[in-house]
Structures are given as C-alpha cells and as structure tokens.
Amino acid sequence: MSGLSQIVKTVSLVLFVPILTFGLYVVAHGHLTPGGGFQGGTVIATALALFLVAFGAKEFKRILGKDFLSAVESIGLLSFGALALLGLGTAFFANFLANSGGLFGKSVPVGANAGIFNSAGTIPLMNFAVGIEVASALSLVLLLMYLSEKGVGK
Amino acid sequence: MIEALMQNLPFVVSALLFVIGLYALLFKSNLIKMAIGLSIMGSAVNIFLIALGYKENSIAPIFTNAPINGSINAAKMAMPIPQALTLTSIVISLAVTALMLSLAVVVYRHCGSLNASKAWRLKK
Amino acid sequence: MKAVAKTLVFLVLVFFLVLTAIELRPFGKPKKSTMDDYIIVEGQRETAANNLVSAVVFDYRGYDTLGEATVLFAAVSGVYLLLREAKK
C-alpha cells in the first residue's frame, strides 16, 4: 500500500476541495483583490502536493501523469503568448478587451468601488493562463522530485 | 545615527537578511545549505524592493473597497511597479531554487557527496 | 590563512552593507516617480482593473511577465531533464 495512513488520506481528501476552491478564487479575482495567476497557481499546487504526499506517486500518476502536466504547462504558456499576440492590432500586449463592452469589457468607476468582476479586459484571461501554467509547473517539479527517489512509483 | 537606524529599520533588516544568506554561501560547503543561502539572499532583495516602494501612510494600490474618498491622490498609494517586479522576481527565484535542488540531487547521485569542495572530483 | 582572509572580506562587506542601509534615503519618503503616479492616477481608467499591481504585471509590463513565464518553463524543463526516473 503506497502513501500514508488512512487518517492522512481522509483528512487530505477533506482539505483538497477547499484549498482548490481558494486557489481558483485567488486566480479568478486577480484583477480585483490581492492575488493573481502566480499566487493562485501556487495555492492550487499546494493542494496537489498534499494529494501527492498523502496518496503516493502511483495514485497521483494515475490521475495526473507527467505528460499531461507538461502538456497543460505548455498550453498555459502558449495561450498567454497568444493573448499577447491578439492585441497586435494596437501593440504587443495591448489590452484590446478593456472598456470594449464585451467579454470582461465593462468600465469601472474611477476611484474606490466594490469591484466589478466582468472588467479589466485581457487581465483575467492572462491570470487564468498563468495560473494553470504555474500550478502544473510546480506540481510537475514536485512529482519529478518525488519520482527521482529510487524505488518509488514503479 | 540611532535615529537614522530607527528610521531605516526595514532597509537594515533586509541588509542583515542578505548578510545571513551570504554567510551561508561563503562559509558552508553543503550544496543544500548553499541553495538555502541563495534563497535567503533573494528574499532579502525582494524585501528591499518592496520597502523602496513604500510611501508614508499609504495604502496598497488596489481600489476594491479602498479607504479613499474623492479624487485619487497619488501620494496616498504605495508604488505599484516595485511590487509588480518583485512578483516577477519571486517566481524566478522559485524556478532557480527548484533547478539548484535538482542539481544537488544529481551531484549527490554522481559523486556520493554533497560537499562542494569534494564533489568536483568526479568519482568513477 | 584563507579562512582569515575570507572572514575579513565578509566582515568588511557586512559593515558597508549595513552602513549603506542606514545612510540610504529615509524609509517611506521616496522621490516623486512620474511613472508610478501616472499608473496610480490613470491605470484604473486605461485597463479597467481595480488591482494596479495586476495591471502593471499583465498590461503595462507584459514583456517582463512573458519572460518570467518562459524562465519558469525553462527551469521546469531543466528539472525534467535532470531528474529522469532512476534506472531499475
């Protein structure tokens, strides 16, 4: 039996969903509250690290393989670059969605306000791209370090 | 002198943190300890950058439910650019730490020792 | 002898570092920075983001973030290369 004891497994499963939700919240509200793609991605990666430590590499690899994680990381980086290229009508990294009225396109009142989720143009989309990149990169590093130990995860 | 020290305490703290990292880097020969020292030095530089961007009695540069009323006063908000670049620097130092630790693992596997002054003699 | 020289250099470096930190400009009173003031005043109108740090990271200084994401990707590739699974 790989991984730690049954108590640790149960507690980690109980904690897994709240940590994941908090990470997604930090990523999604990066343009309104302190946080963003990097911080939220790190929080998501801690949830995956907890899962990895509690259940062992065999179970973790059954759900999230190395190839899958590196593919997600590449997709995150590429979509970040693609979002930057989409603004090329004006300039590289131009925020073409801000104040346009469409997706994430609402204007915000200048000064202190309560926060409008549907605002800030490409910034939330880039937050998501960077978030999945950082989360998969960190969990890939942890998985590789775990697997490099001899005799683990055959 | 004492007044200047009390006024500049955040800078002094970051300098001392940098010194701790430098001590580990210069006087320890264990590769893991050297990696820890380099990470501490990186954290000291990050703290220094954040402290440089702080204005007296300022709030974080975030408008969601910010305690300001009326027009925006630029002197009442901390500088956003040092904070943003520190965010960049933190992620890069994290990547560098991961790479250093995996290099230490490879060195240990290859030479059977983590001592930096012995490990360069390639075993086998 | 080598250890003594090392210690001496270290102590001199520490002395000058701390002295510099004490003699730096007063904490909390930076010089006026036109760029920061522009971002604080105009950033919310231009990018429609409440979090100005996010606005700087992903909009005004997007190049930096692209380079940083590339560095992270390269570091993870390096870790992947170094920590291949141990031979059985």
Image (cartoon, coloured by chain):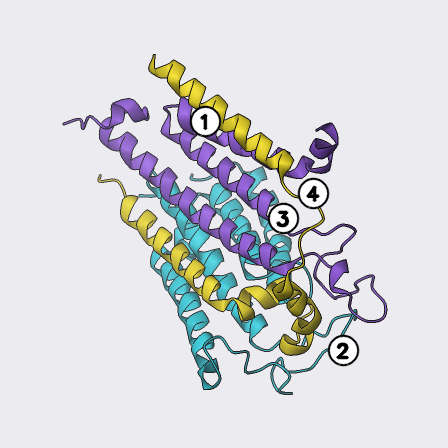
Chain colours: A cyan, B purple, C yellow
Checking the image for residue A109, the label placed there is 2
Locate residue A98, reporting x and y percent: 61, 81
Q: In this view, does B52 lie above or below B84?
A: above
Determine crowd level at label 1: few under 14, some 14-19, many 20+ residues with C-alpha closer than 10 A: some
- Indicate the amino acid at tag 3: Leu
Q: Distance between the residues labelled 3 and 4?
A: 10 Å
Name which quarter of the figure residue B103 lies in. Answer: top left
* Amino acid type indicated by mark 1: Ala
Q: A139 or B71: nearer the eye?
A: B71
Circle 4: residue type: Pro
Q: Distance between the residues labelled 3 and 1?
A: 26 Å
> In this rendering, do the residues under marks 3 and 4 share a single chain?
no
Tell me the quarter of the image containing the N terminus of chain C.
top left
- Give the residue at x 68% y 74%: C42
Q: Nearer the viewer, mark 4 or mark 1?
A: 4
Q: Name the residue under label 1.
A: B24
Determine contact: label 2, label 1, CB under 8 Å.
no
- Please say whether residue B42 is visible from this viewpoint: yes
| Element carrying mark 3 | helix
Q: Do labels 4 and 1 share a chain?
A: no
The subunit carrying tag 3 is B
Chain bearing mark 2:
A
Q: Nearer the viewer's eye, disc 3 or disc 1?
A: 3
Residue at the spot x=48%, y=63% of the render?
C65
In the figure, C21 relative to A37: above or below?
A: above
Q: What element carries label 2?
A: loop
Can you give x and y, in whole percent of width and height, for residue C81 in the image? 27, 49
A81 and B78: which is toward the camera: B78
Report x, y in % for residue A55. Answer: 48, 44
For residue B52, the mark is 3
Residue at mark 4? C26
